[in-house]
Amino acid sequence: MKIIHFIPAFIFFIISVILLCLPGTKNFPAAWWFQKIPQFDKLVHIGLFGLLSLLFHWPAMKSNWNNGRRRIWFWVISCSSVAYGTIMEFVQRELIVNRSFEEADILADSVGAFAALAFSLTFFLQKQPAKAS
């Protein structure tokens, strides 16, 4: 794997750390359009962790690895994304002002990471030629 293929993933990881560590506010403007979308916060978590996982899956897809190594990489990255999301919930509870721990956020993080896993397993593995009998 080439280091250059990791650059988008690391940039997005840094962005995700910044976003997840922003202090909360009790007086959030009620007129903002996204507050009208039900469970918008959970949709953001799904998208954030799905994209994060996909960006870290990408270098394996661009590598010359066989499908077995790629499959292991995809699983490790997706499970690591869930662990990262869980750790960030504890960080929010303990260290970030006006932020809290939510189990539903961990579930949304998991949905995003494992949706990325399903996508990568479906589209990023090389097709094997059919064996003649």
Image: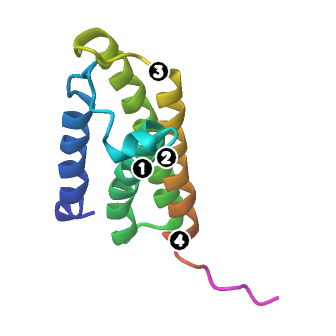
- Mark 4 and 1 residues: CB-CB less than 8 Å, in contact? no
**Between disc 1 and disc 2, whose residue precedes?**
1
Dot 4 alpha-carbon crowd within 10 angstroms: few under 14, some 14 to 19, many 20 or more: few
Which residue, as the protein is rendered here, is positioned at the far bottom?
Answer: 132
Image point (64%, 85%), residue name:
129
Q: Name the residue under label 3.
A: 102
Q: Residue 47 carries which label?
A: 1
| Identity of the residue drawn at 31% across and 42% down | 32
Q: How crowded is mark 3: few (under 14 residues within 10 Å), some or many (20 or more)?
A: few
Q: Which amino acid does label 4 sit on?
A: Phe
Mark closest to the chain's N terminus, 3 or 4: 3
User: How far is disc 2 from disc 3 in space, using C-alphas?
Assistant: 16 Å
Q: Position of residue 16 (x, y in %)?
A: 26, 40
Residue denoted by label 4 = 123
Where's the C terminus, which quadrant?
bottom right
Magenta range is 128-133
Q: What element carries label 4?
A: helix
Compare marks 2 and 3 and give the one earlier in the sequence.
3
Q: What residue type is labelled 3?
A: Glu
Residue 111 in percent (x, y) is at 55, 43
Q: Identify which amino acid the numbered label 1 is placed on.
A: Gly
The one of 36 and 106 positioned closer to us in this rendering: 36
